[in-house]
Amino acid sequence: MNIVQTIANELNVKSYQVEKTIELIDSGNTIPFIARYRKEVTGGLSDETLRSLDERLKYLRNLEERKGEVKTSIENQGKLTDEIIKNLEIAQTLAEVEDIYRPYKQKKKTRATVAKANGLEPLAQIIKEQKETKPIEEIAKKYLNENVQTVEDAVQGAKDIIAEEISDDPEFRKQIKKMYYREGFIVTKSLKEENPIYNMYNDFKEKISTIPSHRILAINRGEKEEFLKVSIDKPVEKILEFIEKNVIKNLKVKQNYVKEKLNNKITSSNAEIMNFQKKEKTTQSNNYEKILKETVEDSFKRLIEPSVDREIRADLTEKADKQAIEVFGKNAKQLLLGAPIKGLTVLGFDPAYRTGCKLAVIDETGKVLDTGVIYPTEPQNDIEGSEKELIKLIVKDNIQMIAIGNGTASRESENFVANTLKKVKETLHKDVYYTIVSEAGASVYSASKLASEEYPDLNVSLRGAISIARRLQDPLAEFVKIDPKAIGIGQYQHDVDQKKLSESLEGVVEDAVNTVGVDVNTATPSLLSYVSGINKTIAKNIVKYRDENGTIKERKELLKVPKLGKVAYEQCAGFIRIPNGKNPLENTGVHPESYEVAEELLKSIGFTKEDLLDKEKLSKIKAKLNEINIKELSNKLNVGEITFQDIIKELSKPGRDPREDMPKPILRNDVLKFEDLREGMILTGTVRNITDFGAFVDVGVKHDGLVHISEISDKYVKRPSDVVSIGDIVKVKVIGIDNERQKVKLSMRGL
């Protein structure tokens, strides 16, 4: 297999792009580094495309390695043929390779291996060849022994051998799988009394070829929880007919003769067919057809059907997992790249009932100023005392924003906060706003070793409030502290392949962190560990170096950090930011290897790198950079056009956070109750989650409303993520209200 060409075709890119990227990967370069600083080499492939390329490269190399192992194993058995070599060469998946290897794989004890051990393989061969004219019972007598005492036992043993051979035939399995996909159905039945979650899956049936991934995952969960029985409805008669046609020579004779007669437009009687059979020296009296039909049916029912059923289910699950992981990854990246709210003192409000609502005030740098607990919710309902405490903190710490977690007691807490902020406005003439923040994973973080190291003197419950506040200030810096699976966006993330999910999310977080860049003097070890080229050990060493030597003034100082050598430095340097360092270029994404080009560029328009620190001069620099002839100057400075354009962008916005372009959270000072909703209302909301079947939008009531995929746009939508992103602020219309379950259906059509 030509791996380069295969990947190029799959990703719809050029062969040279794949070839050069593979060289970079094999040389130890990270995906973020390749995506950002080797665009000239890869032809500008995006980080998503590069990750897909890397994933396929690993799979195809593993596939080729497995082909080699299988080929060697079969060769060592003295059974390797040109046909097997050819089939291995054209195999596209590991499953195909394993099907080819199946007949030669060392087997555990089976009915067929027992029959072979009893000397019945020659009898099986006679039955398969269907040439003998003697009755099979007479032939079978020759194979009787102490382990095979009757003719029936001998014939049955021979049938077992043939049944296993049929089951192991890779071409049969390949064609049977095609029949499953072409005509098969997934069928489910309820095993327990009515369950609202799985109601739609009672007496449910859908084609294997069209069933969407989210339904596969739902069915799998229902089966695991023992609510559903799942089976596959497949065209059994067609499958048996297909196998028989290829196993029973008598059938081939009949079919070929009839086909020949039809081609000659001559009709045939049964007598003529029988005469033709006799000419071919076949005979019904030997019962070959009957024996082989029974064998085919046994092979399918006992060996092929259970195996292929499992494989089809596994294939569907693998595809569904892949789709769910892609959705989860895309959602996670959008959440991580949410717009930060900078320069404000924020109160984190972690709602609860019995144990009280935890409060934590942090200043604009993330430093904890105050903590506390109030009890405005059931069972205590201490509204008056809670109001006094909240107002006291607002005045004392000059709180400008309240971040309320969206978990248990969130809406009751929102009511309380909204009413308190009205009083603050009326009595203190001070505007304070609140917003709802995802608290997914906050409890996981609170009890983590990392949280204990950050806040050793604080109660576990208060750490959650700090995390909620910091998520508003800087979502990326806070979410990287949490296992990405605990972020709680996507679909069925706990049901998919956890290893693949973790690998995918590691890549997503890495891409997000490197897209933004990291201030080396304020970043936590958690954030630093996701920077290209920096692992957890190096991240801790950077923080330790910082603590012992003070502020890092320039990027090359990182080379003094233990275990951070030249290779790691090359990978990480461009993603490190030093806002008030010695070199203004180090607060941009310009890599040290391009400093000389950047300075020459500035010089060509009459400025120096120090002028980037002057706001008045910066606006002039931007104007001049817009007038540059990129092609001409890039040639003059001997730098690629794509890299040159990136340098220009960085010099135009030194220190600018790319997340500033993302939608800001909706700020509220009043609350909307579920009872206030009416069909036809137009509301503004925040997209909180995206799945294959729709988007969930927070419009300010207890539960996020669902915009079904059919209601996302006036045009056809293949995937909701093609239209909306996590954190988007959208207008929606209320089209359905379920008072009993407190759920609302929304639409974006016509808006």
Image: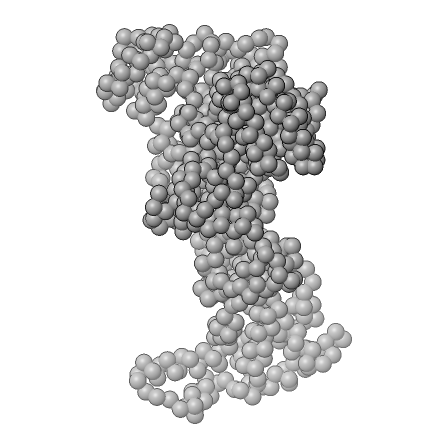
Image quarter (top left, top right, bottom left or bottom right) of the C terminus: top left
Tell me, yes or no, if residue 70 can be seen here: no
Query: Residue shown at 58%/80% (left/top)?
Result: 291
Question: Quadrant of residue 635 in the image?
Answer: top left
116 relative to 471 in the view: left or right: right
- Of residues 130 and 491, the one nearer the viewer is 491
Give the x, y percent position of residue 614. Answer: 36, 8
Give the x, y percent position of residue 224. Answer: 64, 54
| Figure check: 656 above or below 256 | above
Tell me, yes or no, if residue 223 can be seen here: yes
Query: Residue shown at 62%/69% (left/top)?
Result: 302
Give the x, y percent position of residue 128. Answer: 55, 75
| Figure check: 11 above or below 163 | above
Give the x, y percent position of residue 329. Answer: 50, 39
- Of residues 696 and 136, the one nearer the viewer is 696
- Of residues 678 and 335, the one nearer the viewer is 678
98 relative to 280 in the view: left or right: right
Question: Quadrant of residue 443 in the image?
Answer: top right
Query: Residue shown at 57%/37% (left/top)?
Result: 411
| Figure check: 652 above or below 14 | above
Which residue appears farthest toward the bottom when viewing the image?
271
